[in-house]
Amino acid sequence: MSATPRIGILGAGGRMGRILIQAVKEAGYQLGAAVERPESTLIGTDAGEMAGIGAVGVKVVGSLEEVVKDCDVVIDFTAPAATVHHLKVCRENGVAIVIGTTGLNDEQKAYLDESATETPVVYAANYSVGVNVSIKLLELASKVFGDTVDIEVIEAHHRHKVDAPSGTALMWGEAIAGALGRDLKKDAVYHREGHTGPRERQSIGFQTIRGGDIVGEHTAMFIADGERVEITHKATNRMNFASGAVRAAAWVVGCEARKYDMKDVLGFNEIKV
């Protein structure tokens, strides 16, 4: 890991982008670049002033191509189509990328996997350290309970979130399914209405709530006859996501080309449950 990695922020003018710029400064790293859409009215402004931390001498630009050489790694919390383009630029220039974009389809995920053979990629639906700790707890609970419980995942986010279930909820579902030896694509239940019949034990249910300014709340319920275990994570602000992403960015600089996740960043793969 570089002592002072140059970190570029993509989607810099958005809510998450501005917080990421703050997180880079708080971590003591160098802001290498700030990128917005070409048509953005923020082009040419100082990225630090835009983020409310004072001038940093880095101007917001309209494309990653303009500044990719000024970065050791970039952080992308944008949209699927933009992320694919950014992956292409990073791949061509050998720059590492940390991706927090959710809602990627199978084709876009395949391109991400392909790109990771040529440049380091960290890809996670959630960069909160707490969320990733909770995944370890989910794996433990799943292995202990096995097929003796019904499992439901409930998630809640603000009214502006555009994908459902959340990427984190799906990440939790994958962790649970993996620990149980199940296939989430076959066993996930996203909708119940009308006469559904008895619940099938292997199902992993998902419930989605959208409203107000909820930052992010997730609960996994392991439900048996006579008792219930719940594992819950609640985010009260977005800085924990940003801090985790910046931590991942600093960690991945200098790593070999492959796909990583927060388990790698936090060393969780060395912890057996």
Image: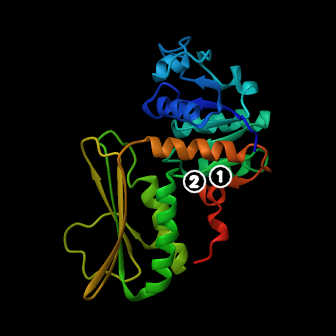
Residue 167: x and y, percent?
46, 53
Quadrant location of residue 153?
Answer: bottom left
In the image, 131 versus 151, the foreground residue is 131
Q: Residue at x 46, y 66 (%)?
A: 173
Mark 1 nearby-residue class (10 Å; few <14, some 14–19, many ≥20): few
Q: Residue at x 80, y 50 (%)?
A: 256
**Rounded to the nearest whole Å, what is the CA distance between mark 2 and mark 1?**
6 Å
In the image, 87 versus 131, the foreground residue is 131
Residue 148: x and y, percent?
39, 88
In the image, 50 versus 120, the foreground residue is 50
List the residue tagged with mark 1.
Answer: 110
Quadrant location of residue 63?
Answer: top right
User: Which amino acid lies under the numbered mark 2 shown in the image of this protein?
Assistant: Asp
In the image, 79 versus 54, the foreground residue is 54
Q: Is residue 18 above or below residue 117?
A: above
Q: Is residue 30 above or below residue 104?
A: above
Q: Is residue 223 visible?
A: yes
Q: Are marks 2 and 1 in contact (CB under 8 Å)?
A: yes
Q: Is residue 100 visible?
A: no
Quadrant location of residue 155?
Answer: bottom left
Q: Residue at x 51, y 63 (%)?
A: 133
* Identity of the residue furthest to the top in this view: 44
Is residue 95 rendered to the left or right of residue 183? right
List the residue tagged with mark 2.
Answer: 106
* Identity of the residue furthest to the left in this view: 194
Residue 159: x and y, percent?
29, 42
